Amino acid sequence: GFFAPWSEPRGKGCLLAHSLIAFGRGEWFGGGLGASVEKLLYLPEAHTDFLLAVMAEELGFVGVALVIALFAWLLVRAYVIGR
């Protein structure tokens, strides 16, 4: 199910397929905060397990890139402080 979610989208690959759909629906700038459809019906535990997929649908590629950049900045700061 992990390597080929589209081979069995209603079985083993259901969660991964819907998270990929959420990424695709977000496009470049997303649909806006709170506008995610996948978190309402299709992704269980969207507030924990599929947080990045929901953020991608709501904030788009730009929002996800910003979140990853913030995590990278936090990691760099932690290394600088630790050093």
Image (cartoon, rainbow, N blue to C red):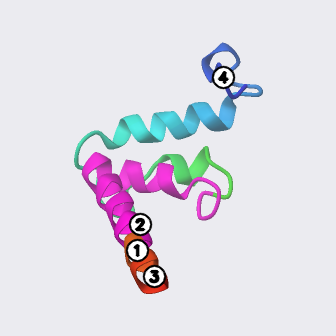
- Say which residue label 3 marks: 83
Kind of residue at badge 4: Phe
Sooner in the amino-acid sequence: mark 3 or mark 2 = 2
- Say which residue label 1 marks: 74
Looking at the picture, does residue 64 appear above or below residue 18? below
Q: What residue appears at the point 61 percent right and 18 percent down from the top-left corner?
A: 6
Across and down, in percent, residue 30 comes to: 28, 49
Looking at the picture, does residue 37 appear above or below residue 9? below
Q: Quick one: 72 or 57, which is closer to the camera?
A: 72
Sooner in the amino-acid sequence: mark 1 or mark 3 = 1
Q: Is residue 73 magenta?
A: yes
The disc label shown at residue 11, or none: none
- Say which residue label 4 marks: 3
Q: CA distance from mark 1 to mark 4?
A: 31 Å
- Say which residue label 2 marks: 71
Kind of residue at badge 1: Leu
